[in-house]
Image: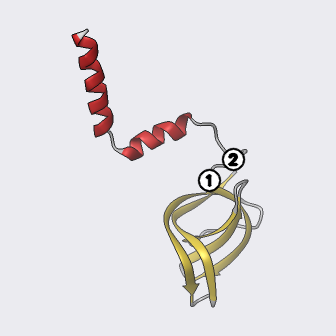
Amino acid sequence: MKISRLAIAFSIGLALLTPVHVLAAKVSANAPNTTVGMAANEGKVLSTLDAPGYTYMELANTEKRFWIAAPTTRVKVGDRIRFEQSMVMKDFNSKTLNRTFDQIIFVNSATVLK
């Protein structure tokens, strides 16, 4: 009986010491994908805008339509893109494009999927 109480106490202590993002990753890895055929960090290119140093892409996946800004990337409408999210900005004004985006995701990289 003492061993099982010790094991329970150890398990609780270990769970409390495990970072939350590690636990969340384990849960999401075991959860079914909520998108059909596309992850949340993927999308089909609907439109593009080029600016010095950046390619702005309007993407759509099964969850939503959204804009990302990536380092200059060769893409075309219809391409499927996977990206690494970096920072979300709301009401972002691009002086170069003379446009304000309600929300845009600045990404470290964007890759065209085959």
For label 2, the crowd category at 10 Å Cα-Cα, with few meaning under 14, some 14 to 19 and many 20 or more, is few
State whether residue 111 is above or below residue 95: above
Quarter-of-image position of residue 82:
bottom right
- Which residue is drawn at the image coordinates 33% and 34% (left, top)? 15
Name the spot of residue 52 as percent of width and height, x first: 56, 83
Q: Position of residue 70 (x, y in %)?
A: 56, 69
Count how many numbered circles sit on residues in the image: 2
Residue placed under numbered mark 1 in the picture: 40
Q: Which mark is residue 100?
A: none
Q: Is residue 23 shown left or right of residue 61?
A: left
Q: Position of residue 90 (x, y in %)?
A: 55, 76
Which amino acid, by three-letter code, is at mark 1? Ala
Which residue carries the number 2 mark?
A: 35
Query: Regarding mark 1 in the picture, which secondary structure is present there?
Result: loop
Q: Residue at x 68, y 49 (%)?
A: 38
Tell me which amino acid carries mark 2.
Thr
Could you say which is closer to the camera, residue 112 or residue 45?
45
Q: Position of residue 13 (x, y in %)?
A: 26, 32
Front one among 6 and 44 = 6
